Amino acid sequence: MEIIRSRERSVLPPLLASAMRRAILLQVGIIAGFETIFVLGALSAERLAGSDRLYGLSLMTPFALGQLLVALPAGRWMDRWGRRSVLLAGAVVEAVSLLVLGLALFAGWPGIFVAGLLLLGLGSGAAQLVYVVGGDLYPPHCRGEGLSLMATFSSVGVVAGPYIVGFVGDAAERLGSDPILAPWFVASLIVAAVAWVIAGLHPDPLDVSRAPGRYYEGLARLAGDPANAAPARALPRLLRLYPIAATVLITVCFQGVRMSIVPLLTFILRARGYSLTIGATMVAAMGFGMILASYPAGRIGDRWGRRRPLLGATLIALACTVAVPLTGSLPLMFAALVILGAAFVTVLNMGRAVITDVTRPAERATTLATTSVAVGVAVIVFPTVAAYVREIWGWQHVAILGAVLLSIVFILAYFLRERGVGRWDHHGVEE
């Protein structure tokens, strides 16, 4: 295959840059679509079940179960058959599920709504693995940059989704319609559009990852690198490597912090008399921080290693997690959430970079999918725990839950042993 020369202003050759743009559009659309549940979930639970306390148990559980069920199979399919077909199927399923959710809420069918959430988890769980493409298309020495770009545009989805929900909901309310209903249909249209975009993804990113030398002139020596062509190791063996095991646990804890705070924000602020747009703005605040910090975090990780940014971001997140439930000031809450988002995306990028460093192309999507399983666990457990903490002891006590989780993150990151950028001590376990 012809070697495509990189342009000076971009590390990606034109063909791969086009593929990256399609992946980015899918990333934005998928995240914006399922962010609807984080803005409207507690309000929908109150309507369907009569209590926000049932938000985590009755609504978030089927969504998270869907993501848990599909994550590892989708990762294996991506490693075996390529990235494009799995991502397309996931996007189509998510678009259909959002339509089902809107219809079920309109008709007042709680059972169908819960089934739609399970379907949403299945579709989004497969499609959100698109972030793997960032590690596939970029050369090995720039993987942190590639993964950080995907995380940056994931953050755009995190910001855009709540704003779309807020604007559409408030507009519907001004027109005398149901503000909780219309956003589901708009989200379905957005996801359907990005599904059409990803259908044209070429070349398949898995092919690029296996033979980067075919696409980068300076990496021609890797075109037949035995490490890239080596068979996949069994997942249990990979999970015995401390960098991978620690990253999965870090993901559970850090996502637990997010799931303890963000889903309750709209409910808390609506109870205080604020508009849906204000609530959506607070939900989106972490996304602003993620956008600002994601790309710099990836570059820092490529230059200075993964461990130090992990430790620093965790300490910053600890201070902000305590501040959010304790403050009654909207500007201070917004600022703390923005900084928390910056810390969150730094940990996310470094964790994904660690797994990409340690794995081979034929096992990478499967291993990264374990972090999606970790997210699913956090989504099942922590909204429910936080809702009970808020109801029994008060919103301020959610800060204690977050502080405990971040202390665990710091300990796990502290014991990582990085011999150099992207080179890890596996704590005596053979690679």
Image (cartoon, rainbow, N blue to C red):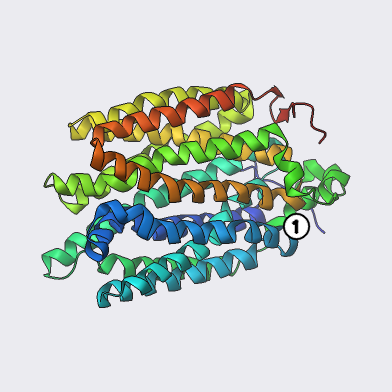
Mark 1 residue element: helix
- Residue beneath disc 1: 207
In the rendered image, is residue 21 in sight? no
Residue 355 occupies which quadrant of the picture?
Answer: top right
Image position, residue 221 (x, y; %): 86, 42
Quadrant location of the C terminus?
top right
Identify the residue shown where x is 54% and y is 46%.
374
In the rendered image, is residue 11 in sight? yes
Q: Amino acid at mark 1?
A: Asp
Image position, residue 100 (x, y; %): 38, 74
Name the one closer to the observer, 50 or 267: 50
Identify the residue shown where x is 75% and y is 57%.
207
Quadrant location of the N terminus?
bottom right
Identify the residue shown where x is 37% and y is 43%.
385
**Left or right of 214 on screen, residue 274:** left
Residue 360 occupies which quadrant of the picture?
Answer: top right
Does 60 appear above or below 147? below
Image position, residue 121 (x, y; %): 48, 61
Name the one closer to the observer, 154 or 417: 417
User: How dense is the environment of label 1, judged by Cα within 10 Å: few (below 14), some, or many (20 and up)?
Assistant: some
Name the one closer to the observer, 301 or 409: 409
Does 89 appear above or below 9? below
**Left or right of 390 on screen, residue 431:** right
Identify the residue shown where x is 44% and y is 22%.
315
Image position, residue 77 (x, y; %): 69, 63
The mark total stands at 1
